[in-house]
Amino acid sequence: MAARIQHSYRRNGMYYIRLKWPSRVFQVLPELGHEFNNSLKTHDQDRARLLIYRCAYQFRQLINFIDTCLDLDKIEDIKPDFIIETLKSTIFSKKETKQDMSDTPDFDFDLENKIYIEVDPSTGTQRIHSDLEDSDANQLEILQFMGKAGMGFSAGDGLAESNGPTVEDIAKRFIQEKIASGNWTHPKTRSQGTTRLKFVVELLGAKTVFAKLGRKDIISVREKLRAMIDPQRERRSKRDGTLSADTARSYFQLCTALVKFAYDEDIIQINFAADLSLNVSRGATDSYRPFEPEDLRKLLNGSVYRSIELPRQRTLVDSYFWAPLLAMYTGGRINELCQLHIRDIKCEQSQQADDVIWYFNITDDELDQSTKNETSKRKVPIHKQLIEIGFLDYVEMRRQAATSDTETLFPAMKYCKTNGWGRETGRWFNGETASPGYLDSLGLANRKNKTFHSFRHTAARTLRNKGVEESDIAAAIGHEHKTTTRRYGAGYTLDRLQQIVNALDYNLDLSHISFEEFE
């Protein structure tokens, strides 16, 4: 990897350094000027590069000092002359001028192993790279370089300063960033993420200065999580100190994300968690599975759809009948379907036929509605099978019975701040720790791997087997396609989406499905 020298310019062969002060600094300390410029007093490129790296690091430290003073409202503690002199002395100290240039660390940037550092002085962010393929050797190479470059570090100390933000401090900032960026806006996502992050913080040491952590600490967390994995652990099991492989993996992903966040925020100079992952052989009991054709037949011939009287504690509500059917023919998530309002069932004129297209408008327009992400907001044409079994008749019945079309499509449900409108239906369908669900009554193979979310996998697999393109599947069921981040629903006409949705053909007999019988 070729070395690059940034933040410099040359005059008559002499190298000069140029570092731009962030606007927030210049606004309160105009005496500093917009930039710090100074001669490096060398014509040698490698020597200039080393001096720039050293000065850029000191530049970042001074920005941190200034920010701290501003946060504490102690601007009088900032002496512009001292700031400038500190930078100049960093470039070429008196002690160093008496040394022979041969004492300067010799870095041969033409060797096979190369160090490459990029510094953004406006933020102080450093990017430090080594081209060694082995991650541990890569880390050691960088640490050794930092020590030789006089940046105040030595190999093995994690690039630590004596003080600084703790692990729990960084975790709080991480949560704020997740919420502000829209990634943790859903109450359930935020609650789950916060709870899991708290556990990760405990594993790392809440009061530990983050910059004192190193790769060995992340590896230690990984091994602790691995030791907690119980391959036979079932979903909805009681808490017993064990984790499923998927849950352990999500904890570790959160841990490495926290380290990357600290790196991006310039708390640490190396992302020492890069390329680390928790790999666990996925057992037969450790992943969601789609429903098989026989599962769907059993599901549609169970007590709900055959009006079989069963001893039960729950009072059946409309969503128990409709939610599984809607999920089967939309691939929708349980909360997307249960949170529908009456007015979210809409129609538009077809562009290709003299007819209208009815569709679900999945959105988060109302305060009690939410979507997982931007790609989840979409229009999903109502499958022809749903229309044939009377879904639009049900919608009209609800429209006439309701006092407003802002009422939920399915009545008698309870709203949960964490899980939205889908919690009650999900518990009825999937079951709870001490209470079997509808699926448990069907005698399905590999039952523990199947939940309401399996409908989503089933729909995607069915479309895939029909030869539907991945981007088309993403547009219909609200996935974000792996190769891009653009919204796939955008740009698709309802006619095209209808073609995609109607490709969901399970070859099932629905002639006995009747909401009137369910009532």
Image (tube, rainbow, N blue to C red):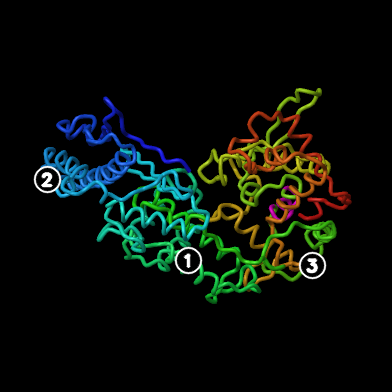
Q: Of helix, strand and loop, which one carries label 2?
A: helix
Q: CA distance from mark 2 to mark 1?
A: 41 Å
Q: Amino acid at mark 2?
A: Asp
Q: Amino acid at mark 3?
A: Ala
Count of labels in the image: 3
The image quadrant of residue 34 is top left
Magenta range: 319-326
Tell me the mark number nearer the camera, choosing from 2 and 1: 1
Residue 422 position (above or below residue 27): below
User: Can you identify the residue that label 3 sits on?
Assistant: 445
216 or 97, which lies in front? 97
Where's residue 237, x and y in %?
61, 72
Q: CA distance from mark 3 to mark 1?
A: 37 Å
User: Can you identify the residue that label 1 sits on?
Assistant: 219
Residue 315 in view of the camera: no
Residue found farthest to the bottom = 240
Q: Main secondary structure of the magenta part?
A: helix
Q: Amino acid at mark 1?
A: Ile
Q: Is residue 26 left or right of residue 53?
A: left
Q: Residues within 10 Å of mark 3 (few under 14, many from 20)?
A: few
Residue 193 position (above or below residue 115): below
Q: Residues within 10 Å of mark 1 (few under 14, many from 20)?
A: some
377 or 354, which lies in front? 377
Q: Check residue 320 for magenta coloring.
A: yes
Q: Check residue 406 for magenta coloring.
A: no
